[in-house]
Amino acid sequence: MPETIPILIGEVTVDFTMPTRTTDAKVRLGGVVHAARGLWASGRNYSVGAFCPAYLVEQARNYLSQHGCQEFVLLGEVTGAPNVIAIADVKEVGHQGYEDILRDERRVVPSCDHVDLSRFDPVVIFPGRYDLGEVINRLKPGARVTIDAAYDVDGADVLRSLAGRIDSLVISTSSTLFSKLALSDVAPLLDLAKSIGAKQLLLKENRGGSRLFDIRTGAIEYITATLDVTMNSVGVGDAFTAVFGTFDGSTRDAAWRGMQVATVYSQTTWPDDLQRDIERELRIPIEVVRGLGGVTLPWHVRPGLQIYLAAPDFSYTDHIEINAAVAALEYHNFRVRRPVKENGEAKREAPIESLSPYYFSDVQLLRECAAVFAIPIERDPGTLVEIGLAIEMGKPVVTFDPRNENRNTMVVRGSTAYSSDLDVCLNGTFDALSKLERGADR
C-alpha cells in the first residue's frame, strides 16, 4: 500500500513583525506556511494546497520545497490585498496582536484548472476567504479531514454545511466562532461538533493548555501547556493543528505531540533552531511527556479564580502598565477585581478617621480572591501592604514590577512570581492558579 501524503490547505501570507525599541522588524512567510514549518521540523513529508497572491507564488513554492513540501498545488489567487499581516510585539501587550492589511478588500479567484485533491489523505484545512465547500468536494470520500476554525469561520452554519465530511474540529479561545458559541459554556461547541459528525474536538486554550474531547464517548484528555518565554505566538496554533491532524497514531498521542511542537514554535522564529529543538522533543516517549506536568487551566474555570489587583489604580494617575496588565489578564478570561474601582477611592486629603470603610472593604475583597496580581509602581505603600497581607493569608502573589523599583527581599521572595516582564508574570499567574485548581480537584 503506497504511503499517503498529508496535505495542508490554506492561504499564504507575509508576516511583518513591527520593530520595537529593542528589536528590528522581521518579515517571513506566514499563513499555511506556519503549519508547514511545524511538519518540516517534525521530520514529516507533506504537500501544500495554497491560495496565494500572484507575487508570492514562486517564493512560496521555492521556500516550501526546501522545507519538506513534496508538492505545491496552487488552488487559487488572492486578489485585492497583499496578504500582509502586521504583527505587534508580544512583549508589549502580553499577547500578539495583528492587523490583516486590506482584509475587507481581499478576494480569492479559484484556479481555472481542475485540481485533483483526491490523492491526498489526511487533509488539514485552514479556512480563509475561499470556498470551503468547493475544497471539501474535491477530496476523496472518507479522507481524514481536520479543520482549524480559528479564523475566517464566523458562524456555525459554515461548518454545518460540511456535515459528514469533518473528522476533527480544532478551535482556539481567540477565535470568533468560540466567542459566539462558547465564551461561558463549552456545551454549544460540543453540540456543534456532534451535529457535523466530527469524532473529536480539540480546544486550544492558550497558556492554559488544551482539551481534547472525544465526541463519541464523552472522554476528555487534558493536554498541559509548558510555559516559557514567549518569543512569538503567531502560527503556534497552526503548527499544533498540523501535527495533530497528520500524526500517525492515536488522536490522544497526536494532541500531545502537537503541544510539544507548538511549545517550541512559540520560543523561536529561526527555522534551524526550531527543527533542532523539535527533533529533541519528539525523541521523548509519549508517556514520559504526559507525566512531565505543566499548566492545565481551562478557559471556563478561570473566572471563578478571581484575581485581586494590588496597584495604585487611582483616578488621578495614568499608569499604562496597569492598564496593559489588566487588559492582558482579561484577554485570558480572568476576572480581575479592582478594589479602588469597586470599593471607592478616598480623596487624597481625606481625614484619617474616614479611611476605615475603604480599608475593611478592600481587605474583605482580598480574602474573597484566589490570588493577587500586584503592580507596585512608585513603591506605592498600599500595594506593598496588600502584598504582605496576601502572603500572610497564604495566597499566591504575582508581582509585576515594570520599572524595577521593588527588588526587595520580602517582595521578591514572598511573591510566587516576580518580574519586570509582563509575559513572565502572565505565565506565573497561570502556573499559580493551575496549582490551586488542581489542589481543589483533589
Image: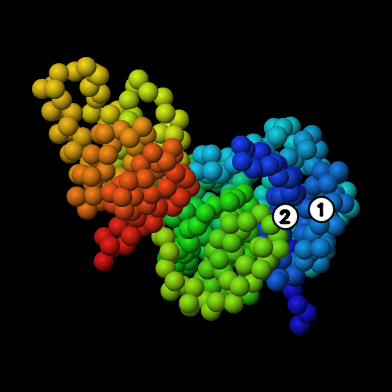
SS for callout 1: helix
Q: In the image shown, does 269 or 369 lie closer to the viewer?
A: 269
Disc 1 residue type? Ala
Which residue is painted at 81% across and 67% down in the image? Answer: 70
Query: Is 39 located above or below residue 382 in the figure?
Result: below
Q: How is the image coloured?
A: rainbow
Residue 11: x and y in percent read: 73, 49
Disc 1 crowd, CA 10 A, few/some/many (<14, 14-19, 20+):
many
Q: How many marks?
A: 2
Residue 60: mark: 1
Q: Which quadrant would the C terminus be assigned to in this image?
A: bottom left
Write down the residue under mark 2. 33
28 to the left or right of 369: right
Query: Is 154 located above or below residue 33 in the figure?
Result: above
Residue 210 in view? no
Residue 114: x and y in percent read: 86, 55
Residue 5 in view? yes
Which residue is painted at 37% across and 52% down in the image? Answer: 417
Disc 2 residue type? Val
